[in-house]
Amino acid sequence: MLTVERPWDDPADTLAQRRRITIRQIGLALLSRRLDKIANAPGAKIIDGAAQEAPGKDLAWSTTISAVAKDGEWKAALTTIEQELRRALKYGFNQSELKVQLTDIEGSLEDSAQRANTRTSPALAGSILGIIDDNDVITTPQFRLDFFRKLKPTITVAEVNAEFRKLWTGSKPLVFVTEKKDIGKAALAATFDASRKVAVAAVKDNGGTKFAYDSFGPVGKVVSDTRIEDLGIRELRFANNVRLNIKKTDFEKGSIRYSIRVAGGQLALPASKPGLGAMVSMLSGIGALEKHSAEDLKQIMAGHNVQIGFAVSDDAIVSGGTTTPRDLALQMKLSAAFLTHPGYRKEAETRWESLVPVIEAQAKATPQSVAQMKLPAVLANDDARFGFPDEDVLKQRNLNEAKTLLTPLLASAPIEIAVVGDVDEAAIIDAVGHTFGALPMRELEGPKYAEARKVSFRNGVAPVTLTHSGDADQALLAIAWPTDDDEDLNRVVGLNLLAEVMKLELTDTLREKLGATYSPAASSFASDVFDHFGYVLAATTLAPDKIDEVEKAVASIAGELRSTPVSDDLLARARNPNLERIDRQERENPYWLAIMEDAQTNPDRLERHRKRRAVYTSITPAELQQLARQYLSPDKTLIVKVVSDKLGKPVQAAAVMGTEKGAVRP
């Protein structure tokens, strides 16, 4: 990291000052783009980089350029930021770079203005609170858009370069490097001085690139069109078997949420390739397309609100996110291009080599990170599909094996698309018809993957101890009981309420009576992908010397839930937030997208939506007691402790890093 300090000032919030700030932020953004390009290049020695300006109120302004290096590559990172800053200061930026950045800014401001009338109260409150102690004025998104549009034609490369150079005046540069080993000031100074002697050249202005994926074949024909009147959902199917679900809402003006699911996902990948799905999910955007690199796409898509890449979920390959009505057709083209012509580029593998050690270090850093990355796999009997394997296994994964396995799946597996928000139905049908609907014939029903859906809760209940690399006074206790999948809605709702009751009891007992923790949690997980797999989990962070005491308290609470029906008051305290959540979700696009994403493939999800409030209302204390007796059995209790490796070296469980799989949907 290289930082320069300038004297503090806080001018009045005038139009002239806003112009100056805007132009300076453009310069910093352009330098950050150059660092991104370096990080995304084959053989890159840095993982990420950025330039920014930050206030130290009443003290100084700081301008900083920083980079995150691959393990052991601090010299390369330092020379990169030194030379790129010097290159920008000496030669400035070019017209093509400026054009892309201006287009990006305008597109973002347009989207904000479109959504202005559907901003949430917390967002508005945050905007107000953010300027209370500043010499600034609140303005509307439309004002900011109009101001930028007046400003844009007058901004020149020369002005951006001049203001950018002012950001780096003031103190002598402060260089800061963090490394696993002490590198010493002499080595740091020598590396920095050597870098400053290297000549730099201007970045060439190569102009723009046109998007290569504009046509996917003859426009698809709709062969089935049905409306579900009570839910306001329209379901269509194209002649090639691509399914499309649409719902128009006014919850987010100017915004559209979408999901594109290619059936299969992790279920279709071999268990002998642990970590492959995670690698693909992390690298898809960097691998980009056959004819365009990630940097090409940044330039081509400048000013457009579109998402790149896809991710591997438990039972699908998913492309999803948020776009706008004006960019919907482009988003469908971009997503279809990723489906038909993914890049699997060398620079993506370079990034993977850089990320694996970082993932490993982060996974071990705190008890919470260990629980997040390893606990789900422990609960799933060490099934490697439930998370990240160790570093040496992850390093074996490569894009060639990903390409071999994903190509046939992407070419033929069933596709279901969901779109919700500020939509024009005719425009969506046309956009999908020109892209996914124009693809060759797809399967209507994919394989059942019966064997791949088999997973079991951990065999035996011997306590498991995991370790983290953080401070010795940090620990986490997790206690789990096996349950079942989400096939039975009444059971799912009952277990959710049972977990909510347990959380309330834990909060009262642990926080108020024992003073042992401030973050008790309890939840129920019921898989909608893996057969008969689920669990109730109670977890809390705490001091290591409190583990035994809290373990006994949790066992006592579980025993009370088995032996005595909960009071009507306690049940109401557990139920009412869920009923409020149900009412709130009716007005939220993310919820509707979740239940629509496979509405034709799994139509029962819509019926569950209709019934869920009634089921939550109907659950009785006696039913909760019966569930507790059935599932919260002492002889099925699994105890997992996460303690610091500085306390000693307990026996490690054969666990892998991961995240929960097949999360239940209401």
Image (cartoon, rainbow, N blue to C red):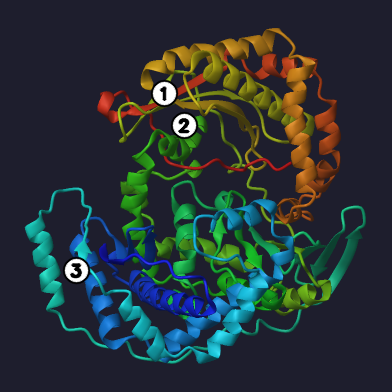
Q: Is residue 245 left or right of residue 143?
A: right
- 360 or 166: which is nearer to us? 166
In the image, what residue occupies the spot 69% across and 7% down? 563
* Residue found farthest to the top: 563
**In the figure, residue 558 lies in which quadrant?**
top right
- 38 or 32: which is nearer to us? 32
State yes or no: discs 2 and 1 in contact (Cβ < 8 Å): yes
Question: How much space separates mark 1 and mark 3, taking CA atoms?
Answer: 53 Å
Q: Is residue 2 left or right of residue 406?
A: left
Residue where numbered disc 1 is placed: 464
- Does residue 189 lie above or below 462 as drawn? below
Amino acid type, mark 1 = Val
Screen quadrant of the N terminus: bottom left
- Does residue 485 lie above or below 357 as drawn? above
Residue 612 image offset from top left, x and y in percent? 81, 37
Residue 443 image offset from top left, x and y in percent? 71, 63
Res. 378 mark: 2
**In the figure, residue 213 lies in which quadrant?**
bottom right
